[in-house]
Image: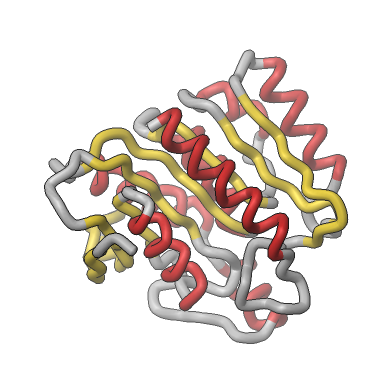
């Protein structure tokens, strides 16, 4: 496995400091950069592990801490934290995180990926920052209003679970229609028999190893082709 370096950094955002976890390959690069956006649990071990996995594949990956130190362990707690998140503030923080990566001399182009809550935020980030050259939202909500997708500058690799009570077929079709309307390049992947958060290998009740392996390979190929 390639050697990587990890560190906690502070990013100036909205007049305050935003903590983030960064994992990078050894060497001077340039490397493609990725913003990795958390699920509703917070910046916990799984998201940090995914961030490091991207680094072993040659990306400089940065995971912002949008809950500012809080991590949920129970679904009810996670839901409360997500509902109380100041979304406009989080959106601005994510734009600052992109700015931070693009200012890194070891980073070339920057993409974004997010899971669950982070999937929706990744899409919104791609709408808000022209510096995001490719985006891969996993089972995330659509931007509001959905017409904002006209501002996305790069291709979209959207991932969904077939049996998802949160992000259902109606959500998928709405995004597909908006992307087609605005002439965006996109690929939409719906994994049969899977449920919401099927990529999270710390949740044996929902994790689907076969689908996770497949989507991981496709995600790496997508970002390598577009960053």
Query: Looking at the picture, how far across and down is residue 54, in whole percent?
Result: 40, 55
Question: Exactly how many numbered labels are in the figure?
Answer: 0
Query: Looking at the picture, how far across and down is residue 84, in whole percent?
Result: 58, 69
Q: Is residue 205 above or below residue 158?
A: below
Observer-nearest residue: 180 or 1? 1
Quadrant showing the N terminus: bottom left
- Residue at figure coordinates x 71%, y 59% from the top left: 210
Q: Is residue 51 left or right of residue 208?
A: left
Observer-nearest residue: 100 or 54? 54
- Residue at figure coordinates x 54%, y 44% from the top left: 219
In which image quadrant can residue 212 be found? bottom right
- Residue at figure coordinates x 47%, y 33% from the top left: 134
Q: Is residue 226 visible?
A: yes
In which image quadrant can residue 111 be found? top left
Observer-nearest residue: 200 or 62? 200
Q: Residue furthest front?
A: 1
Q: Is residue 177 above or below residue 138?
A: above
Q: Is residue 197 visible?
A: no
Q: Residue furthest bottom?
A: 73
Coloring scheme of the render? secondary structure
Q: Is residue 116 left or right of residue 42?
A: right
Query: Looking at the picture, how far across and down is residue 103, in whole percent?
Result: 18, 41
């Amino acid at each position: 496995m390639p050697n990587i370096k990890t560190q906690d950094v502070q990013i100036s955002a909205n007049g305050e400091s935003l903590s983030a976890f960064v994992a990078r390959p050894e060497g001077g690069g340039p490397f493609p950069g990725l913003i990795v956006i958390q699920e509703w649990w917070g910046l916990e071990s799984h998201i940090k592990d995914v961030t490091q996995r991207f680094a072993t594949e040659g990306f400089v990956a940065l995971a912002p801490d949008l809950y500012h130190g809080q991590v949920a362990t129970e679904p009810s707690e996670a839901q409360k934290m997500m509902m109380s998140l100041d979304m406009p503030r989080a959106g601005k923080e994510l734009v600052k995180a992109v700015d931070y990566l693009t200012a890194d001399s070891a980073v070339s182009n920057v993409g974004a990926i997010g899971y669950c809550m982070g999937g929706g935020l990744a899409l919104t980030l791609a709408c808000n920052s022209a510096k995001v050259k490719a985006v891969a939202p996993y089972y995330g909500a659509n931007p509001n209003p959905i017409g904002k997708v006209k501002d996305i500058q790069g291709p979209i690799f959207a991932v969904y679970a077939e049996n998802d009570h949160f992000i259902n077929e109606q959500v998928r079709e709405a995004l597909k229609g908006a992307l087609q309307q605005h002439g965006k390049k996109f690929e939409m992947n719906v994994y049969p028999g899977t449920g919401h958060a099927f990529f999270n290998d710390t949740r044996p009740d929902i994790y689907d190893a076969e689908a996770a392996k497949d989507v991981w390979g496709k995600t790496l190929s997508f970002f390598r082709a577009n960053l």
